[in-house]
Image (cartoon, rainbow, N blue to C red):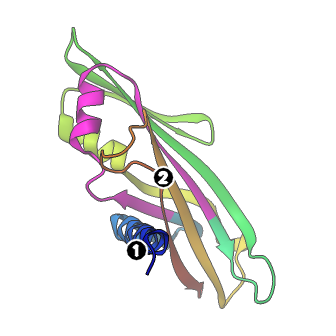
Amino acid sequence: MTRRQLLCSALAVVGAMHVVGAEERLRIVPLVHDKQMVVSLEIADAYTDDVREAVASGLRTTFTYDVELRMLVAGWVDRTVATSVVSISVQYDNLTRRHSLSRTVDGRIDEAVVTEDEELVAKWLTSVERLPLCSTAKLERNRDYYVRVNARKRPQRTFPFAWTGPTSGQAKFTFIP
């Protein structure tokens, strides 16, 4: 085996490990609640030391989640039923020692909180609870769907820091009313 082939094989293995790790870290739970299709998601271990340091420095830190609800279409491109973009930002004020948190959904402010609790900051940044995507009237009975999520953070650090790139994952389900 040549040196080039060995290097390409090693890169393929590392790339495959990154994809598997990303899917394990992102938990997506699609639910039907009050005739609404909602989704909850969480990224395990995303509030790392480098994120904590960025927040503590007073630098605005933002986690953005691109959420798509798609219908499986055999032999064709899957149809997008609904999309949503959730951005969660935190800015730490060193003088008051408080965190200002804000959550926007599709460009509109959904909620804003000021807290001193770092655990609440970590929970806010790394999870979204019951995000409404669409009415169940848009869904067809007994069809297969999936929710795909791409998550990214800013500021972005590079190798060798944890979670260097976007994380993505999906959860499949069959809509049975």
The picture places residue 115, in percent across and down from the top left corner, at 25, 27
From the image, tell me which residue sits under label 1.
13
Image mark for residue 166: 2
Which image quarter is the C terminus in? bottom right
Q: Secondary structure at mark 1?
A: helix
Can residue 25 be found in the magenta stretch? no
User: Disc 2 vs disc 1: which is toward the camera?
Assistant: 1
User: Foreground: 154 or 115?
Assistant: 154
Crowd rating for badge 2 (residues with CA inside 10 Å; few <14, some 14–19, many 20+) = few
Which residue is farthest right?
76
User: Foreground: 50 or 29?
Assistant: 50
The amino acid at mark 1 is: Val
Which residue is farthest top?
95
Left or right: 177, with 64 as reference point? right
Residue shown at the point (27%, 45%) measured from the top left: 47
Query: What separation in Å lies between label 2 and label 1 (alpha carbons)?
Result: 19 Å
Q: Which quadrant of the view contains residue 121?
A: top left
Tell me whether circle 2 and circle 1 mark residues in contact (CB < 8 Å).
no
Q: Earlier in the sequence, mark 2 or mark 1?
A: 1
Q: What span is in magenta?
A: 39-68
Q: Secondary structure at mark 2?
A: loop
Q: Which quadrant of the view contains residue 73?
A: bottom right
The amino acid at mark 2 is: Pro
Left or right: 13, with 160 as reference point? right
